Amino acid sequence: MNTLLVSLRRDLLLAGRRRSEVLTALFFFVVVVSLFPLGIGPEPALLRRIGPGVLWVAALLATLLGLPRLFAADHADGTLEQMALSSQPFVLQLAGKVAAHWLLCGLPLVLLAPVLGLQFGLEGDALVVLMLSLLIGTPLLSLIGAIGAALTLGVRGGGVLLSLLVLPLFIPALVFGAGSVEAQAAGLSVRGHLSVLGAMLALAAFFSPWATTASLRIAME
Amino acid sequence: MRPLHTFHFASPATFYPLAGRAQPLFALLALVLAVGGLYVGFFVAPTDAQQGEGYRIIFVHVPASWMAMFIYCVMAFWAAVGLAFNIRLAAMMASALAPTGAMFAALSLLTGSLWGKPMWGAWWVWDARLTSTLILFFLYVGFMALQSSIDDPRRADKAGAVLALVGVVNVPIIYFSVRWWNTLHQGASVSMTKSPSMAHTMLWAMLIMALAFWMYSIAVSLARVRNIILEREAHTEWVQHAMA
């Protein structure tokens, strides 16, 4: 556990020294979300209808934006190899890095989502459900994305390839995340949606660090 | 008694001639079955009461969808074997299957839209099955793109294997989430007509075509894996000897 925390602290510290990278992903999220009303038109009813989906798709893309940097710098300066060789479990160190990625790329989106939701005419309970779904969903995105980032590490055209690999795997999260807000709007219980999201998160939290470890070891052979 | 060599044919050098002998056999089987299946499908099977003659595309469409899903599982199986036992040939087999699987997924989407236009009045509907086939196609494309962008073949094999395994875990999750998503968004306004009792000849034609596609997949992937073997083992003596 200590290993995980050390690795987490290190990544947070590094990000604190280069704040612009974190802010870029956040502003990307805001800009993408703001483009939709401009492209579709300002009718409140329509915006309220598409709002959850737009916010979720934008969150997906914003998460994707931060992924190539997850391992790239550490790979370039050899830190990653030292981590793999060290006596501490590699998988825990990576879990720490993924947790840091979520704290830096995912959590800000969750906190910002209600403000953007207001722009789409979402109110009250809908915003709460949106936040909850993103709170459960964004760590899931980070965990799945980490596998893709590890697989495409140091590969030609890594960034585009990463999106091709990872986006289809994001689909279940998108379906249940955006679906939960729509279920709330339709007056249905959101518990089912959030439970499925939670189940997927639990699955990913268990399997994804192992798959990421395996992929990174392959990449560093 | 000779000991059983489980991994005897796991060596490219022994598998290459075996594949060469088996490949024409499967190709012939595929041809015979396809001709038989198409004959039953076009001339023996009765005209559908609701859909007329247009339904006959089912004999290509449904087997293609089956094969697209099945080949992904086979591909993931070989990828897992390759990763677990560190067998090069298994990984080559996985790479050889991917283009065929992608082709069947694309064929299924194409015939689906050709069928959908006259029956549903739309080239594309966001039906759960159509959408999950589309996503399956994306997964195949991702697998091939990843493998082709890594220069070192051994690394490409292993990275592809991890991706195929992650994909095969996700395929059922994606399938069910898309199905749930579809039932939430639009009621079952359009669903493939489940005829109460499908005529036996129709079912037979479909099964024969599925077998034909299966044999075709084996033949084509054997041919492809032979090429991959030659390409990767070009430095070895036996390849140089075989090519001389």
Image: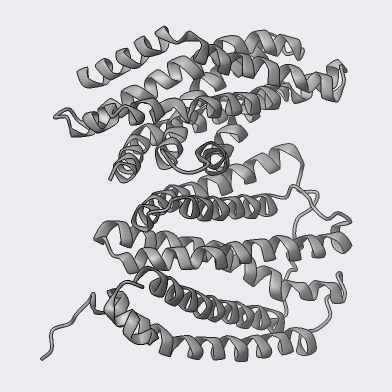
Which residue occupies 83% across, 55% down? B123
Q: Quadrant of the N terminus of chain A?
A: top left
Res B75 visible: yes
Instruction: From the viewer's side, name the closer residue of B177 and A161.
Output: A161
Residue A130 vs residue A105: left or right? Answer: right
Which residue occupies 53% across, 77% down? B220
Which residue occupies 31% across, 56% down? B83
Which residue occupies 70% across, 69% down? B61
- Coordinates of residue B152 in the picture (x, y in percent): 37, 54
Across the whole image, how many numbered discs are drawn on residues? 0
- Coordinates of residue B138 in the picture (x, y in percent): 60, 50
- Coordinates of residue B233 in the picture (x, y in percent): 34, 71
Instruction: From the viewer's side, name the closer residue of B150 and B208.
Output: B150
- Coordinates of residue A97 in the picture (x, y in percent): 35, 23
Tell me: residue B176, above or below residue A120.
below
* Location of residue A161 (image quadrant): top right
Q: Residue furthest front?
A: B244
Residue B54 vs residue A142: left or right? Answer: right
Residue B126 vs residue A141: left or right? Answer: right
Res B18 visible: no
